[in-house]
């Protein structure tokens, strides 16, 4: 039986997907990075070491609306993951005016069915905010291409700035807009473009205003975040270019799922072929080409993390409205099936995978069991400390009523209490070294296994420690008391 392509059909499908993601988001334990970003949300700042502050703002809003639990942390991300489809739908209609409504809805469905969006919708990281704002940016640019008011350039600046406040890689698609604008100036003009100079300048001012807090935070913290992200280019191994390029291409095929990846590539081919005649097609080609070239260049000498290229996914999805749809339902169905299977493995672990291949086991499993092991040896009044930020943040979510301490130099950059004294339990992976100079005494208590159903995620060593009384200011600043679940 043929399924009718109607707005009701696609909206029902989107509604089912959102309901499933809300359930998964509620029951799946937080990953270490999510728990870390939760600390950000409870320690507001203009920016942070690893990323700009948007993910923290979204988590704070979610916690306010849904509570300090996994669903609250992820709530805004799940809703935004669904909401971006409406902006993509309008972007298709404006950028590719010849596309039928059914093609626009199917383009949205293809993006929703990617494994990348299935994961990013229920695991709260900076990728979800940047995906959302880049989708809004596509809609705004569609209004400009369709001959809308010059004021839309102000919206471009605002949304581009919010995208940068989500993740630094947002500058790459924005650079693609600059390339498109230059090309249109040379080939043909977008309607009214010559009268838009003032609005473009205003958009630039709005973008600068949006990113000023991030710039200010970096300027007052030794440019720590920019140095951390820019430092990724220092490790350069061109002899491993084939390995890195292969990992990049295979990883993206997996995150898109193969069927959807074929449609994404096909859509880009059609966009390039129509670039001279259709300004919207040219824009989509530029939005993808600039980031893709940067990632390919980076892969010549270093590994590209699998989630980095998601900034091009909204443009890839819109461009699929340029191609035929004979096998579109199969690609969408296959992607949704893969996402559902990943959810099932994460929640119920039906396959006996090791921690090397099961990311959910490695990152999310066994934290409450570890909390019980710590509680069995910790004395009243002792703090619980961890030598890495992920473990410390996870313990802050599962140890209400305890003082949980992060012990890394990164914590000196947080607006958190640093008045840690006395003794407690140190928690650390035995393969990870930690600074022993801050302790007057260290007694190893043993090693416990974090995991689930007999499968080990990682070994964890427990130590009873006592801090020295003569710690330097820098050493004390590197120790912070983290906000625990329940407001403790």
Image: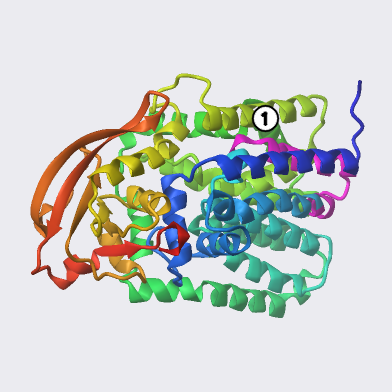
Residue 265 vertical position relative to residue 470 in the rendered view, above or below: above
**Quarter of the image containing the N terminus?**
top right
**Residue 102 magenta:** yes
- Residue 257 in view here: no
**Residue 134 or 68: which is nearer the viewer?**
68
Residue 414 visible in the current orientation: yes
Considering the image in quadrants, where does the C terminus appear?
bottom left
Say which of 250 and 341 sits in front. 341
**Majority secondary structure of the magenta segment?**
helix
Which picture quadrant has residue 271?
Answer: top right
Residue bounds of the magenta highlight:
90-116
At x 12% / y 68%, what residue is drawn?
Answer: 471
Q: Is residue 72 or residue 46 the one in the foreground? A: 72
Residue 160 at what x, y percent from top left? 61, 65
Residue 434 horizontal side relative to residue 226, left or right: left
Q: Position of residue 447 (x, y in %)?
A: 22, 35
At a point 63% along the width and 32% down the height, the residue shown is 339
Task: Determine crowd level at label 1: few under 14, some 14-19, many 20+ residues with C-alpha closer than 10 A.
Answer: many
Q: In the image, 12: left or right of 421?
A: right
Residue 474 locus on image (x, y percent): 18, 69
Q: Nearer the viewer, residue 15 or 116?
A: 15
* 298 part of magenta stretch: no
Number of marks in the image?
A: 1
Q: Which residue is mark 1?
A: 335
Taking 129 as reference, is 424 left or right?
A: left
């Amino acid at each position: 039986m043929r399924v009718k392509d109607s707005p009701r059909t696609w909206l029902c499908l989107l509604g089912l997907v959102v309901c499933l993601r809300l359930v998964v988001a509620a029951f799946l334990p937080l990953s270490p990075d999510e728990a870390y970003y939760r600390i950000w949300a409870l320690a507001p700042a203009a920016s942070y070491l690893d990323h700009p502050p948007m993910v923290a703002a979204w988590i704070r809003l979610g916690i306010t609306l849904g509570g300090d639990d996994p669903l609250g942390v992820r709530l805004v991300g799940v809703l935004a993951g669904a909401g971006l489809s409406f902006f993509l739908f309008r972007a298709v209609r404006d950028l590719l005016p010849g596309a039928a409504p059914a093609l626009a809805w199917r383009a949205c469905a293809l993006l929703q069915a990617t494994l990348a969006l299935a994961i990013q919708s229920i695991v709260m990281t900076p990728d979800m905010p940047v995906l959302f704002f880049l989708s809004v940016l596509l809609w705004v640019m569609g209004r400009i291409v369709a001959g809308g008011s010059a004021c839309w350039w102000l919206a471009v600046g605002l949304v581009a700035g919010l995208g940068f406040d989500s993740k630094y890689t947002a500058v790459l698609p924005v650079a693609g807009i600059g390339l498109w604008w230059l090309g249109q100036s040379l080939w043909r003009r977008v309607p009214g473009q010559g009268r838009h100079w003032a609005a473009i300048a205003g958009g630039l001012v709005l973008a600068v205003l949006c990113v000023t807090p991030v710039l200010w935070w970096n300027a007052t913290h030794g440019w720590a975040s920019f140095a951390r992200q820019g430092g990724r280019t220092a490790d350069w191994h061109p002899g491993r270019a084939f390995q890195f390029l292969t990992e990049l291409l295979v990883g993206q095929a997996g995150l898109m799922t193969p069927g959807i990846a074929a449609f994404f590539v096909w859509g880009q081919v059609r966009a390039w072929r129509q670039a001279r005649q259709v300004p919207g097609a040219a824009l989509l080609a530029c939005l993808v080409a600039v980031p893709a070239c940067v990632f390919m260049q980076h892969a010549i000498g270093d590994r590209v993390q699998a989630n980095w290229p998601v900034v091009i996914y909204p443009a890839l999805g819109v461009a699929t409205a340029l191609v035929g749809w004979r096998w579109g339902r199969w690609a969408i169905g296959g992607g949704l099936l893969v996402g559902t299977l990943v959810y099932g493995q994460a929640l119920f672990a039906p396959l006996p995978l090791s921690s090397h291949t099961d990311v959910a086991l490695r990152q999310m499993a066994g934290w409450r069991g570890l909390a019980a092991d710590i509680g069995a040896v910790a004395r009243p009044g002792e703090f619980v400390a961890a030598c890495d930020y992920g473990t410390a943040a996870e313990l802050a979510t599962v140890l209400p009523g305890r003082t949980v301490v992060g012990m890394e130099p990164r914590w000196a950059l947080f607006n958190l209490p640093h008045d840690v004294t006395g003794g407690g339990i140190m928690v650390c992976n035995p393969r990870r070294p930690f600074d022993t100079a801050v302790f007057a005494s260290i007694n190893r208590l043993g090693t416990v296994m974090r995991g689930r159903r007999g499968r080990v995620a990682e070994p964890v060593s427990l130590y009873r420690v006592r801090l020295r009384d003569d710690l330097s200011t820098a050493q004390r600043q590197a120790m912070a008391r983290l906000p625990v679940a329940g407001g403790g």
